[in-house]
């Protein structure tokens, strides 16, 4: 009878250990998924900021191009006159 009780107690302890291991693994997986999502959002935010900076730079460059075109036309007009 004692042997059966010992086997039952050992089996119960093993089930508790297995449950603890599974719980820890699930927590680790959840934390990894949360970390990946956080990094992904951060990368997307940086991408949006970089795109905004590129748009601003493009607007400035278009303004510079327009100014240079105006100056070039004025120089050609005066040279032809």
Image (spheres, helix red, strand yellow):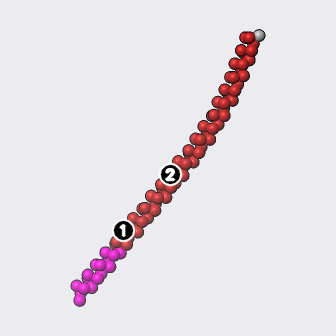
Residue sitting at x 57%, y 48%: 45
Residue sitting at x 29%, y 82%: 8
Tag 2, which secondary structure?
Answer: helix
49 sits to left or right of 6? right
21 sits to left or right of 5? right
Q: Main secondary structure of the magenta part?
A: helix
Q: Establish if 67 lies above or below 41.
A: above
Residue 35: % across, % down: 48, 56
Residue 68: % across, % down: 68, 22
CB contact under 8 Å: marks 1 and 2: no
Q: Which residues are magenta?
A: 1-16
Between 25 and 67, the residue placed more toward the observer is: 67
Callout 1 crowding tier (Cα within 10 Å): few <14, some 14–19, many ≥20: few
Q: Quadrant of residue 14?
A: bottom left
Q: CA distance from mark 1 to mark 2?
A: 27 Å
Per the image, is 3 magenta?
A: yes
* Residue at the spot of label 1: 21
Assign the N terminus to one quadrant of the image.
Answer: bottom left
Assign the C terminus to one quadrant of the image.
Answer: top right
Residue sitting at x 69%, y 18%: 72
Total marks placed: 2
Closer to us: mark 1 or mark 2?
Answer: 2
Tag 1, which secondary structure?
Answer: helix
* Residue at the spot of label 2: 39
List the single residue furthest toward the right: 81
Q: Establish if 20 lies above or below 68.
A: below
Residue 3: % across, % down: 22, 85
List the single residue furthest toward the bottom: 1
Q: Establish if 75 lies above or below 9.
A: above
Which tag, 1 or 2, sits closer to the chain's start? Answer: 1
Between 60 and 39, the residue placed more toward the observer is: 60
Between 22 and 50, the residue placed more toward the observer is: 50
């Amino acid at each position: 009878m004692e042997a059966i009780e010992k086997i039952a107690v050992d089996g119960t302890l093993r089930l508790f250990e297995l449950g603890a291991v599974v719980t820890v693994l699930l927590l680790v997986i959840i934390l990894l998924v949360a970390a990946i999502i956080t990094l992904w959002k951060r990368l997307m935010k940086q991408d949006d900021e970089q795109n905004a900076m590129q748009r601003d730079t493009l607007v400035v460059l278009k303004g510079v191009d327009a100014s240079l075109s105006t100056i070039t036309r004025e120089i050609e007009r005066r040279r032809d006159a």
